[in-house]
Image: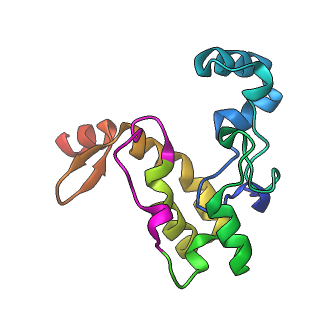
Amino acid sequence: MNVNPELIAPCGLHCEPCPLYRAQHDEDLRQALAKRLQVPPTMATCPGCRPSQGSPTPLRGELCPTYSCVEERGHDHCHECGDFPCRMLQPLAQRAENLPHNLKTFSLLVLRRDGAEKWAAQYPLICKRYFQGKMVIGKGSVLPEDEKQSQE
């Protein structure tokens, strides 16, 4: 897998699998996202955090403070900072069922441990566990297929 480093956001999100990023090249997806988000189709795409110089579409013209912080400190990713993890990566319950904001710290730790290529290969499963996993005390996030395998 060849990972474009420009599509790895400083906060640990991966732009490439994001529907807003993919909508740049998929008109049907762009139209569906525009309808779901109740925005014009031109606002239903995103080039990514780095290609937009820290102003991705969801921020509606604002500069991302996390992006600015990483740039000011001369890092590529938050995990390189001596203050990592900081409150900008603090998990929150608000909108957790819809946004990937709570997986950032875990994602950054996997990126630091495994490097970009292995991280990118794992990222879809990281997201799947975040959105579809069930928390099992002592085991962490468990997917329905994990439970089926353990019952066999």
**Magenta stretch: includes residue 88:** yes
Position of the C terminus, as image quadrant, is: top left
Extent of the magenta region: 85-100
Q: Position of residue 46 (x, y in %)?
A: 75, 38
Decide which of 149, 35 is in the foreground and name it: 35
Residue drawn at the location 48% of the way across and 62% of the way down: 89
* Colouring mode (rainbow / by chain / secondary structure / one colour): rainbow
Give the quadrant of residue 69.
bottom right
Residue drawn at the location 23% of the way across and 57% of the way down: 139
**Identity of the residue furthest to the front in this view:** 62
Q: Is residue 142 above or below residue 138?
A: above
Residue drawn at the location 38% of the way across and 42% of the way down: 94
**Identity of the residue furthest to the bottom in this view:** 82
Q: Is residue 18 above or below residue 108?
A: above
Residue 129 seen from this side: yes
Q: Is residue 64 above or below residue 16?
A: below
Q: Position of residue 56 (x, y in %)?
A: 72, 45
Give the quadrant of residue 148.
top left
From the viewer's perspective, is 111 left or right of 72? Answer: left
Decide which of 97, 88 is in the foreground and name it: 88
Residue drawn at the location 68% of the way across and 19% of the way down: 34
Residue 10 seen from this side: no
From the viewer's perspective, is 133 left or right of 13? Answer: left
Decide which of 132, 97 is in the foreground and name it: 97
From the viewer's perspective, is 9 left or right of 46? Answer: left
